[in-house]
Image (cartoon, helix red, strand yellow):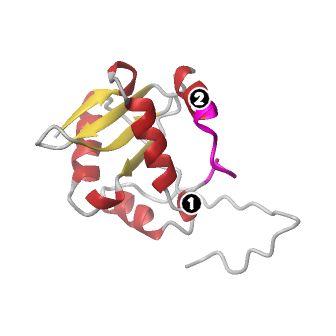
Amino acid sequence: MRLVSVYQTEGAEEFLYHLLEERPAVANISHKYMPSEQEHRAFMRSQPYLAWYIIYDDEDCWVGSIYITRLREVGIQIMESEHRQGYGRRALRVLRDRHPGKLLANIAIRNASSVNFFVGEGFEPLSITLELQEDKDVGPIIP
């Protein structure tokens, strides 16, 4: 398994857009709607993260992405077809080697699998952020 910068990978924009399409709504924090391909490309061209990588498997196939923000926040997404293969754990270890120091993971509270993943990797809960949407009946927030 290896990580390669999305900014040096031809076809990364399309692959990352496909990953974004696969992402379940329960995982979204900042996305209120699915961006257009043009919006997605503009976001990528802005180079919003300290580092953003394509995750390659041992066969040199793309299986996901991982990034670290300038605030040291980590985000990982693995293709649905490749879930539970250990790619997230392995990619996180490579990222930690490349970017040592404190890391944060902001996770939507309803995304129990991501919460469990990061806690299993040694991350500790710091806070819960809540949002009130005037026009939406949210219901219970604790799974």
The mark that comes first in sequence, 1 or 2, is 2
Residue 75's place in the image compared with 22, above or below, is: above
**Residue 88 inside the magenta-drawn segment:** no
Label 1 sits on residue: 108
Residue 27's place in the image compared with 73, above or below, is: below
Q: Amino acid at mark 2?
A: Phe
Prevailing secondary structure class for the magenta stretch in the rendered image: loop
Q: Is residue 104 visible?
A: no
Q: Furthest-right residue in view?
A: 134
Closer to us: 128 or 81: 81
Report the Cα–Cα distance between label 1 and label 2.
21 Å
**Residue 31 inside the magenta-drawn segment:** yes
Label drawn at residue 85? none
Q: Dot 2: few (<14), some (14–19), or many (≥20) neighbours within 10 Å?
A: few
Q: Position of residue 77 (x, y in %)?
A: 39, 49
The picture quadrant where one finds residue 1 is: top left
Closer to us: 75 or 97: 75
Q: Dot 1: few (<14), some (14–19), or many (≥20) neighbours within 10 Å?
A: some
In the image: residue 58, left or right of residue 120:
left
Residue 82's place in the image compared with 56, above or below, is: below
Q: Amino acid at mark 1?
A: Ala
Instruction: Give the residues drawn in magenta, as a range.
Output: 29-39
In the image: residue 139, left or right of residue 121:
right
The picture quadrant where one finds residue 4 is: top left
